[in-house]
Amino acid sequence: MRESIENALRFLWQRKFENRDVKISEKDLEELEREGFIRKKNGDYEFTAEGLEIARKLIRLHRLAERLLHDFFETSEVEAERSACKFEHIISDEVEEAICTLLGHPSRCPHGNLIPEGKCCRVKEEEVKRIVYKLSELKPGDEGVIKYLAGDEDVMRKAIALGILPGKKVKVIRTFPAIVIKLGNSNIALDENIASQIYLIKSGNAER
């Protein structure tokens, strides 16, 4: 499938499910219809079952690529977006699952958009050694460097207000009855909801 057609499928997904104002040429829409990926209904286009599955897969690949490029190659969000547009077209199923597992099955891309679940997320595949963990998964004594926050706006505001930011090093003091971490010279208590949306690289993998 040509890249332009794959991009059109991804753009149509964003337009229909995320209310994004993205432009798709009539030529590409007509080709998608000919290929059986979409159909016209009541003056608008909707996905066929096959088209929906392909579009979902493309969205997932694109956002996993963004996450990888942003977190581990430290590219800007703009450059991660640009490079992911190329990367998504060459990732095999095996590489996709390996990347997702490596990243700790992230739920959002660097822009905060949802990453559709893959099979590896549902079974929590661990054959590839993980590098990224949720703070809530760590044990007392574990240390790590925060890579990103992946919660809703309220959770992210609370975390940021506590000084929990990407690049900060933390140590888990205890996990019961609340999760307590050492951040700088302060001990901070977190509830499970916030801790489960803070992603970090454990020490041993954290050095740059």
Image (cartoon, helix red, strand yellow):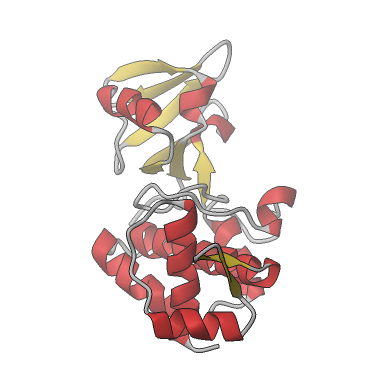
Question: How many numbered marks are there?
Answer: 0
Please give left or right for residue 26 compared with residue 35 in the image: left
Which residue lies most toward the front here?
42
Residue in view at x 63 percent, y 64 percent: 97
Q: In this view, does 158 lie above or below 112?
A: above
Q: Which quadrant is the C terminus positioned in?
A: bottom left
The residue lying furthest to the right in this view is 123
The reply, left or right, for residue 172 in relation to residue 1 is left
Q: Residue at x 42, y 67 (%)?
A: 11
Residue 76 is at least partly visible in this image: no
Q: Can residue 182 be seen in this view?
A: yes
Near-viewer residue (17 or 118): 17
Answer above or below: position of 145 versus 105. Answer: above
- Image coordinates of residue 147 in percent, x first then y, are 37, 46
Q: Quadrant of residue 190?
A: top left
- Where is residue 63? Give x, y as percent: 45, 61
Q: Residue at x 32, y 59 (%)?
A: 21
Q: Nearer the viewer, residue 124 or 57?
A: 57
Residue 176 coordinates in the image, percent (x, y): 58, 14
**Residue furthest toward the bottom?**
2
Locate residue 195, reporting x and y percent: 48, 28
Please identify the quadrant where the N terminus is shown.
bottom right
Quadrant position of residue 128:
bottom right
Above or below, 148 against 57 in this view is above
Q: Which of 93 and 142 is in front in this view?
A: 93
